[in-house]
Image (tube, rainbow, N blue to C red):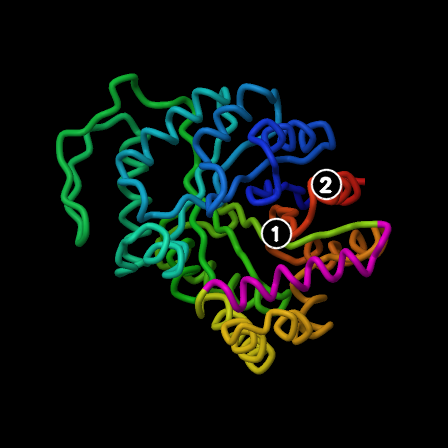
């Protein structure tokens, strides 16, 4: 049976307490895991530590922590600490994010993202093992580091995010799981083949990898409001996050629509950009509408062969009340 996770909305909450309380609400509603993205809102480490303190059973994880803003050894320390804080409920999600985040927000160079992700996974795994980190990679040359407090037990799994064929193949070769974003059902099937090929290249069993698919959801009594929020969310990612998501949608057969939305957004006409998101693209990427319609649409994702968990995520423009209504409705 496909697990139902929740992806906490960092941009929507007026307070840290409110954000952490959503993890508790997800636990009460029966969600399997609460994931926290780290973008321009509150940092994931502080928030997840508080969520660990205020929950008892729900799994917790980062989805995703980018591999540019912290060193790999520090990410390993952080994963070990959050595993301890949560009594073994933590799962680390890593990924390169994109140029708009890394270069514009963190002032770094978005260089060799796939190689960097691979080396982070390898270094973090060594840190979590409790062994001395003596690592010679293309990007990192490390020696002498070791966890002072000993290895976490159990060792938290290390997942990776990927959108393109090579990125997903890398997840299959080196990570414990894959986080998929902005994927239509057909696009997911294509990337799942990449994941399985990567697992075979790494001499691993693909069935041992946990596949988590993030789906934008909005379930409100006002179904049109829910669909408009989801449409605005997609337009923002297509237009406001560089070419990253635009190119991903083009690979999935929505090249014309993705370019139209992107060009309108970057040209300053955001209303036109939102209007340019076609209904078929909205239905292929989101579960939005009345609670009944949204839950029915979510089934198209939870029923996909190869999906272990669907993470309910929320439109960036949704209010706290709308987020909580959706959280409850999708778990019903």
Which stretch is magenta?
221-241
3D distance between C-alphas at marks 1 and 2: 14 Å
| Above or below: residue 45 compared with residue 191 | above
Residue 154 in the figure: left or right of residue 4: left
Q: Which residue extends farthest front?
A: 268
**Residue at 37% in and 52% down:** 105
Q: Quadrant of the N terminus?
A: top right
Towards the viewer: 120 or 132: 120
Whether 238 is among the magenta residues is yes
Q: Is residue 165 visible?
A: yes
Looking at the image, residue 42 sits to the left or right of residue 155; the answer is: right
Which image quadrant: the C terminus?
top right
Percent x, y for residue 111?
26, 60
Please state the horizontal and vertical placement of residue 260, each as a whole percent of the image: 57, 80
Mark 1, Cα crowd under 10 Å, few <14 / some 14-19 / many 20+, is: some
* Residue carrying label 2: 327
**Quadrant of the image occupied by residue 227:** bottom right
Circle 2 crowding by C-alpha within 10 Å: few under 14, some 14–19, many from 20: many
Q: Which mark is residue 206?
A: none
Q: Residue at x 39, y 60 (%)?
A: 100
Kindly identify which residue carries mark 1: 316
Q: Does 47 sit above or below residue 247?
A: above
The verdict on residue 199 being magenta is: no
In this picture, residue 130 sits left or right of residue 290: left
Which sits earlier in the primary sequence, circle 1 or circle 2?
A: 1
């Amino acid at each position: 049976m496909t697990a139902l996770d929740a992806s906490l909305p960092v941009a929507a909450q007026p307070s840290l307490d409110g954000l952490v309380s959503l993890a508790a609400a997800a636990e009460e509603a029966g969600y399997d895991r609460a994931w926290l993205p780290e973008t321009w809102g509150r940092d994931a480490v502080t928030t997840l530590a508080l969520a660990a303190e205020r929950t008892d059973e729900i799994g917790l994880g980062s989805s995703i922590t980018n591999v540019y803003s912290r060193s790999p050894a520090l990410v390993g320390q952080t994963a070990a600490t959050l595993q301890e804080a949560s009594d073994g409920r933590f799962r680390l999600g890593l990924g390169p994010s994109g140029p708009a985040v890394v270069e514009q927000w963190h002032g770094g160079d978005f260089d060799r993202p796939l190689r960097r992700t691979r080396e982070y996974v390898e270094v973090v795994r060594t840190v979590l093992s409790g062994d001395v980190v003596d690592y010679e990679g293309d990007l990192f040359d490390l020696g002498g580091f070791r966890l002072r407090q000993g290895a976490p037990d159990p060792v938290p799994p290390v997942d990776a995010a990927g959108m393109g064929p090579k990125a997903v193949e890398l997840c299959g070769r080196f990570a414990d799981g894959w986080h998929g974003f902005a994927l239509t059902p057909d696009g997911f099937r294509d990337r799942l083949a990449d994941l399985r090929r990567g697992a075979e290249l790494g001499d691993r069993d693909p069935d041992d990898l946990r596949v988590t698919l993030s789906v934008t959801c909005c379930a409100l009594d006002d179904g049109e409001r829910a669909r408009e929020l989801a449409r605005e969310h997609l337009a923002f990612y297509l237009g406001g996050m560089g070419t990253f998501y635009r190119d991903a949608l083009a690979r999935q057969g929505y090249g014309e629509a993705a370019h139209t939305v992107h060009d309108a957004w970057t040209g300053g006409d955001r209303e036109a950009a939102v209007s340019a998101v076609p209904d078929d693209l909205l239905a292929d990427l989101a579960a939005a509408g009345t609670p009944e319609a949204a839950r029915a649409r979510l089934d198209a994702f939870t029923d996909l062969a190869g999906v272990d968990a669907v993470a309910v995520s929320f439109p960036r423009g949704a209010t706290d009340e709308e987020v909580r209504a959706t959280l409850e409705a999708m778990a019903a």
